[in-house]
Structure formats: structure tokens, C-alpha cells
Amino acid sequence: MELNKPLPTRQREVLSLIVSFTEEHGYPPTLADLAGCLGLKNRMTVHQHVAALKKKGLVHWEPKLNRSLRVLPEGLQVLGLRPEQVGSLEAEESPDELLPQARKADRVQSADLRAVGKDKIVAFPQTSQPGIPYAGAIAAGTPIDAALESKEYLEVESRYGESGCFALKVKGESMIEDGIFDGDFVIVKPNPSPNNGDMVVALLEDGSATLKRFFKEKGGYRLQPANSSMEPIFVDAASGLTIQGTVVGLFRKM
Amino acid sequence: MELNKPLPTRQREVLSLIVSFTEEHGYPPTLADLAGCLGLKNRMTVHQHVAALKKKGLVHWEPKLNRSLRVLPEGLQVLGLRPEQVGSLEAEESPDELLPQARKADRVQSADLRAVGKDKIVAFPQTSQPGIPYAGAIAAGTPIDAALESKEYLEVESRYGESGCFALKVKGESMIEDGIFDGDFVIVKPNPSPNNGDMVVALLEDGSATLKRFFKEKGGYRLQPANSSMEPIFVDAASGLTIQGTVVGLFRKM
DNA sequence: AAGGGTACTATACTTACGTATGTGTATTGT
DNA sequence: ACAATACACATACGTAAGTATAGTACCCTT
């Protein structure tokens, strides 16, 4: 079986060290450099580790070419780094020893877990994000490794956050047949005039808000759930139906 | 007496070549590399030129250290380039005035390191999106206007983009009963070891990728679609099943 | 008990790379 | 005419750096 194996500790350390060494010195390390930083007595050990990294497609390394070592985007991803963060002389911890680097990666991971386990909507300070790397269509064969070099990013917040959109958490099953489940978040764009068939957030007379599809009919409006066990709501044109916006996106955490 | 002498043609060419070579290859050139690019038959000629450049303080060049050649800011200035335009990997852009104050401070701090090592400064865009305003649960009455004052934000990219996650576009209907439709984006976290019942991106022997729920069973694995009209896939433990990651989020554009 | 992956060491190469030394030719400007 | 500078080439040498081969040891899982 070939389940995604975790990168061996030492290889991850080497990978991380290549990044920090290159950042610090402005040129890539030699095997001897790496060995020295790792406290190894022999270059061959590093040679083996780097060879493994190359085989896994995480680094670029031309045979017999001095200092040609380079960490590929895939490698940065393994370390939890973004390409934009590398190459800048940013606040990094001492690159000399390498254990802190390894722990740094662990820290990122645990931070992620903490966020996942936490309440769904959290506002915590964050550094800039261009987006989520987009790796291609899932049925298109073997996309991951090759596609992650892509510069495409799935942009969510930048697309919706800036145009007055807001998020709502969905309760209930009224739109289940449209693939919107209880607990999902819909991204709503304030919209004065929805089109027929748009999914809208409607505010009813009684003050309750509901998520339905909007249809204009003779003498009023029909709010149609996507759940065959539920009945549509008919609203008279004269009564107070307020459309708060149309649904332009959906987000679900698992 | 020592007024600005114009840089000799050939030296300027060498200087420019160092920049472009480094950008293109990701590592600095050797003297032989430069000689080759310049059509010279001998490394010594380049050696002289580079030595002259070093003497003029335009490049950093450590004696006997392979590929330690680097163009200093002064050199970039001579070429009419701005330091921000020169990136090691690919990041660039963001002129000085857009940098937040904090980042400028970081630069001052890195001035030490510059003397020791590098001077390449790559600024990256700071779009700083806090997220999508979260307005509450949709069934909770009349939330919108009041809730928009809320300081809560639905964070998407910051949560997933940083931890090595990537996005895949879903093709097909195999997970339709789990509310994942054709055209949706799943956010995948690279995961070495999925748990039973996790939704995973699996790479099958034939090279195709598929989105299924993962179950470990005696003697192998079951990849279960969420579509009653489709059959589960059984994979023998010995054969090549690669799990590329588990699905941790879903995003749909409408 | 056997096999495989990880991790490290040691010796001994071959090649890549920087450098010293020397020669030569134009083109400048005084 | 002379020196100074820019530019180029060749030979040769020493070291920096990558690599082949071989061996040890510690875990795992089967």
C-alpha cells in the first residue's frame, strides 16, 4: 500500500534547513554546509537525505552541479510555507540550528488543529493570504503533484469579502436537495432585486429569516425550499417581504 | 577625482547576466557559466570582469566559494533596477510605499544580516482581508443589519491556505448525497493517515483520482461513494492506493 | 527470523570551480 | 610615443564539492 507517508523527520529537517540557509546566505548550501549545520560528520548522510527529497519531487537538484539545490513549491508546501514568504528576509528564528525549524512546522499544524476544533466563526489575527492553492479538477487523473506548481489560487475572501457580502450559518434542512446542509455557511450578497430562481435570504413578516429559492408570480412571490417534504411559502405582493440578499457562495467545514 | 566613471560595457553585461542567470536558475552562476553565456572561451576573462565589479562594490563575491556571486543593491542601481523587482523564487511587486509600518521595521532589523549575508528583499502584497463578515444563523430572526457590526468573520483562506491545504474542483456526482456537486471545490488537507469515514482524495492504480469516503477493512480498503447508484471501490491492501488528503472544507460558487 | 525503511559513518574517488601566471590586441588620452 | 585601460585567450594548479561503494545500527512490520 502506498498511503501518503509522512516525510521522515530528518528529511524534513534537511528540507527546512535548505530554505533557511538559502535565505540567510543568498545562495544554496552544499552538502557539506548542510552536514555541518546538522552536526553530521559526513556529507554522504546529507546526500542520501537530499536524494530522497529529490526523488519525492520536493527539491530541485542537478547532479554534479555545485549549489544547485533549490526547494520546489511542493517542498514548501510540506513545510507549511507559502512561496511568497520565502526569499524575503523576514523574521525567522535562528537558522543555524535546525530543530527550531522542525518544531515550527509542528506549530503550524497544531495551530490548524486548534482552529478546526474551535468554534466555527473565529476572528483571529492573520497574515495576508492570496488564497488556497488550486490544484485542478479531481477527475483529471493525477493532479496533485504536478498541479501544485500552478499559480492558481482559489480566492474566497477576496472575492466576497470586499463586495459587501456576509456569511450566514444555515440551520435546518430546507435546502438540502440543493446540497446545502445544516451547519453550512452561505455567502450572501446584498441584492435589491433577485432574479427568478435565485437562492435568497428572505425576511418574513414575522421577523424570521429563511433561505429559499425566489420566484415572482402573479400577485406575489413564491419562496421555494429545496426539500420535497416541505411546502413553498407564498407571499402576497402587498405584504412585507424583504429580500436581504442572494446566495453567491457556499462554504462548509468538515 | 573619483567621480562616477561609466561602467565598461562588458562589465555591465556581466553584471546584468548575473542577475538574469540567478533569477532564471535559482542559484548564482559560476565563472564558467558566465563565460558560456557571453560566448567566451575562457573563465579567466570573466574572472577579471567580476573582480572589477567586486572592487567597485557592485557585487558580493567570496573568494574560493563556489557560486557565491551576488549582485548588491549598488549593482542593481547601476542597472536601473529596483531591489524589489528582483526576486529569488517568484514573488515580487508591492512598492515601498504600500508596505505597512511594521514591515519597514523588519527591514531595519534585517540590516544586520545584510552585512553578513544577503540583501535581497522581497516584499509581498499585504492585502489583509480579515474575512467575510459573519452575520449569524439564518433562522435566528432578523440578524442582518444588526449583525454586520459584529466583529466576527468567517475565515476561509487563512485557515486552510496556510496549512498546506489545496483546492480541487469536483467533477462528477459521486458524492452528491453528501451535498457535494459537480463544480464544487473541495479543500483538501494533505493527510498521511485518514480515519475511517473520512472523505478523501484517493489516487487509484490507474492514475485516476477520485473523491470517496475511506474505510479500512480486513484485507484492504473500501472507497465508498455517496451516491446510491454507484458501487463502492475495493482496493487490496497490497495494491497501490495513495491517499492524497482528506477533505476538510467545501466551497461552492453560485 | 527476515526484510525494509531510516539514520549515520568511513574511504576513496571524479568532477566542478576558482585562481595564479602569462600573452596578446585593440582603444583610449596625455 | 607612451602609458593606461578594456578585453580576450591558454595552460596549469589546488581546492571545493558531488558521488560510488561499503558497512553499522536501530527500529518497525510480516
Image (cartoon, coloured by chain):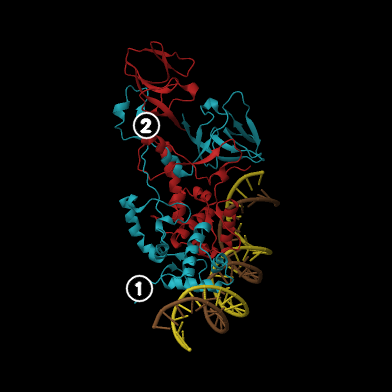
Chain colours: A red, B cyan, C brown, D yellow
Q: Secondary structure at mark 2?
A: loop
Real-space CA distance between mark 1 and mark 2, rounded to the nearest whole angstrom: 60 Å
Q: Residues within 10 Å of mark 2 (few under 14, many from 20)?
A: many
Near-viewer residue (A234 or B3): B3
- Same subunit under labels 1 and 2? no
Tag 1–tag 2 contact (CB < 8 Å): no
- Quadrant position of residue A198: top left
Q: Quadrant of the N terminus of chain B?
A: bottom left
Q: How many marks do you count on the picture?
A: 2
Q: Secondary structure at mark 1?
A: loop
Q: Which residue does the image show at 33% across and 55% down from the upper left?
A: B104
Tell me, for residue B3, which label it has, or none. 1
Tell me, for residue A165, which label it has, or none. 2
Residue type at mark 2: give it: Cys
Q: Is residue C25 above or below residue A195?
A: below
Residue type at mark 1: give it: Leu
Query: Left of A9 or right of it: where is B221?
Result: right
* Chain containing the residue with disc 2: A
Q: Percent x, y for residue C27? A: 49, 76
Q: Residues within 10 Å of mark 1 (few under 14, many from 20)?
A: few
Q: Is residue A203 above or below residue A248?
A: above
